[in-house]
Image (spheres, coloured by chain):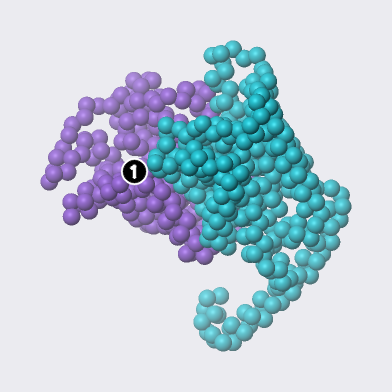
């Protein structure tokens, strides 16, 4: 019993970056229909921008989150405008769009390494307090991250399912021509979606390892699981991405508790291949 | 000199991997993004058999080939019916699994400590490396000659037909899945064998050798050289690995504090090159194969149009039959 309780608790605490990344990734995947590996770099750059404002410019820890997330959104829009949009216009196939996104991902990552170096960089954290309820412990930072993630996730959910803009996104994703005929400007919508996804990815990076450190491979390490979770959840289902990432987080912490953390990844990746096979070819 | 031979041998291994990927992606349209998984499986398999079980090189190579064949057949049977994006994700997941297992299964692979030493198979004092290099050279040239022939053969044309329109090829009575799985298993096995041959080359194996950058380097070579051209793989590897890893890293006069940056600059440029090529020259440096192939392609296109008309007619008929059978239901769906 304690095992189940602990794995749910730890899973929820640890899954926060995954939840955000999966929701943001799903938005782009839904709208443009290709798997964007470069989204992993939104995660990495989010963390590095936070370091820039927090350590480099000496901002207050919590205040540095906001400009960092906005900058990441800008970066995401830039990748769309300068790389992905021209490629989509030229009719590059979805499977080659993925390769293109991997290329862009390497370019951004090693560009970053050339500028700041490959070492881990630590954020200047506020003092850590430790809370204890019913035998389960968590730090103040972990709890704040969890609350922020819940708020952001609810916001995104509301945006996609309850607002006019969400309806526009869904219309554009399902039938672009029809949406254009009814007066929707696909360019504007895409820019906004890439911006939102970038902001969410940046936040995910800031929350990874709960506010602790930034390293160049953090986005790449998270993106595979993110893509997996989003595909299993179903293309375009932000709701599904939310649920699937929570399940993946809990499952990871459960396997970590009973064996080794690396086995959790092996199990998730194998399950992913089997799920794809069971679906029989459709990603959605 | 010894280092040059090592680099050139590694260059040949990369050419072999890119050639196999050319068959998989360029001809057959199977985007295998788990190249390093098959290569790493072969390399670790030979390493474990030689070091832990003390087997001879030939025995370990044969067993490794069998192992990789079984693994790639099972994986192929699971994923080759899926759409391309799904195949890409599944293969990358496979390579991640192999990399993780190399770390976790310490009793077999020694984990991050590393596995070694794997000795050269040719035991002639002083000539081991050179002999091994020529062995690889003969192998790669053999594969290249076969690839040039494959492009002109019926099998090659069937593969291209499957890549361009699998349903059409199937409608002409070809068992496309069988072609795909046999070709996939065979090419992945050769990737594994190339991995096995890299084991005595590297001598000491650690899990950080089987990182996604290897897959990426092979892909960039192929896409740069021209994924549909028989010589594209070779040209691409000369341009990427030959230029950066051999010429610049070994012979360019770089100062020590700058030399640390070279691998990062290399990966940055690989990424930039890949983006540029895919956006501005999607067919790569060499583009498609020769004029004769273009004529064939035009002819094939004509046949394809006729075929697709037939397909559409068949679909329309079956739709009509469905509608008649299911009545209102299909009309509502439409």
Relative placement, left or right, of B328 versus A148 is right
Residue A120: name its quadrant.
top left
> How many marks overall?
1
Q: Residues within 10 Å of mark 1 (few under 14, many from 20)?
A: some
View extreme (top): residue: B255
Compared to residue B175, the image places residue A48 above or below, namely above
Compared to residue B126, the image places residue B133 above or below, namely below
Residue at x-position 35% and y-position 51%:
A248
Location of residue B208 in the rendering, given as x and y in whole percent from the top left corner: 48, 34
Compared to residue A66, the image places residue B146 above or below, namely below
Q: Report in which chain the residue with disc 1 lies.
A: A
Residue at x-position 66% and y-position 56%:
B183
Does the image show residue A223? no
Q: Colour of chain B?
A: cyan
Location of residue A214 in the rendering, given as x and y in whole percent from the top left corner: 39, 30
Location of residue A103 in the rendering, given as x and y in whole percent from the top left corner: 58, 38
- Residue under pointer 1: A261
Q: Colour of chain A?
A: purple
């Amino acid at each position: 019993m304690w095992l189940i309780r602990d794995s749910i608790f730890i899973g929820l605490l640890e899954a926060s970056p995954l939840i955000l990344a999966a929701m943001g990734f799903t938005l782009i995947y839904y709208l443009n229909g290709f798997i964007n590996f470069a989204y992993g770099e939104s995660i990495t750059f989010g963390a590095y921008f936070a370091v820039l404002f927090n350590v480099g410019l000496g901002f207050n820890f919590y205040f540095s989150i906001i400009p960092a997330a906005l900058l990441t959104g800008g970066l995401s829009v830039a990748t769309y405008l300068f790389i992905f949009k021209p490629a989509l216009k030229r009719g590059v196939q979805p499977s080659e769009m993925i390769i293109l996104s991997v290329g862009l991902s390497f370019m951004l990552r090693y560009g970053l390494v050339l500028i700041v170096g490959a070492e881990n960089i630590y954020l200047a954290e506020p003092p850590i307090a430790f809370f204890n309820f019913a035998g389960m412990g968590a730090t103040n930072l972990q709890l704040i991250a969890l609350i922020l993630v819940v708020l952001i996730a609810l916001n995104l959910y509301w945006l996609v399912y309850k607002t006019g803009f969400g309806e526009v996104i869904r219309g554009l994703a399902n039938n672009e021509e029809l949406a254009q005929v009814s007066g929707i400007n696909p360019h504007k919508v895409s820019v906004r979606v890439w911006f939102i996804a970038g902001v969410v990815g940046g936040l995910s990076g800031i929350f990874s390892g709960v506010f602790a450190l930034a390293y160049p491979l953090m986005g790449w390490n998270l993106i595979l699981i993110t893509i997996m979770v989003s595909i299993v959840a179903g293309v375009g289902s932000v709701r599904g991405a939310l649920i699937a990432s929570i399940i993946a987080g809990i499952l990871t912490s459960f396997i970590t508790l009973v064996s080794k953390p690396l086995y959790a990844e092996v199990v998730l990746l194998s399950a992913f291949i089997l799920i794809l096979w069971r679906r029989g070819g459709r990603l959605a | 000199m010894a280092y040059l031979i090592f680099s050139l041998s590694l260059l040949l291994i990369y050419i072999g991997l890119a050639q196999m990927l050319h068959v998989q992606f360029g001809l057959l349209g199977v985007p295998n993004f788990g190249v390093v998984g098959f290569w790493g499986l072969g390399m670790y398999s030979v390493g474990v058999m030689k070091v832990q079980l003390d087997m001879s090189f030939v025995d370990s190579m044969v067993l490794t080939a069998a192992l990789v064949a079984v693994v790639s057949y099972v994986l192929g049977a699971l994923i080759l019916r899926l759409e391309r994006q799904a195949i890409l994700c599944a293969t990358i997941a496979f390579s991640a699994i192999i990399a993780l297992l190399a770390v976790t299964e310490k009793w077999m692979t020694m984990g991050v400590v590393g596995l070694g030493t794997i000795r050269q198979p040719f035991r002639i004092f002083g000539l081991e490396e050179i002999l091994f290099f020529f062995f690889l050279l003969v192998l790669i040239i053999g594969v290249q000659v076969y690839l040039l022939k494959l492009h002109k053969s019926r099998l090659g044309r069937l593969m291209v037909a499957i890549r361009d329109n699998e349903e059409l090829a199937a409608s002409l009575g070809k068992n496309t899945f069988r072609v795909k799985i046999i070709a996939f298993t065979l090419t992945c096995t050769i990737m594994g064998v190339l991995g096995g041959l890299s084991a005595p080359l590297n001598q000491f194996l650690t899990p950080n050798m089987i990182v996604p950058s290897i897959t990426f380097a092979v892909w960039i070579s192929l896409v740069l050289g021209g994924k549909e051209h028989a010589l594209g793989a070779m040209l691409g590897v000369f341009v990427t690995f030959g230029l950066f890893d051999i010429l610049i890293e070994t012979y360019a006069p770089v100062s020590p504090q700058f030399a640390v940056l070279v691998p990062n600059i290399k990966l940055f440029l690989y990424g930039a090159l890949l983006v540029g090529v895919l956006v501005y020259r999607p067919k790569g440096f060499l583009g498609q194969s020769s004029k004769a192939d273009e004529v064939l392609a035009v002819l094939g296109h004509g046949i394809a149009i006729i075929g697709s008309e037939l397909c559409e007619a068949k679909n329309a008929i079956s739709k009509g039959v469905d509608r008649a059978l299911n009545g209102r239901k299909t009309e509502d769906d439409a």
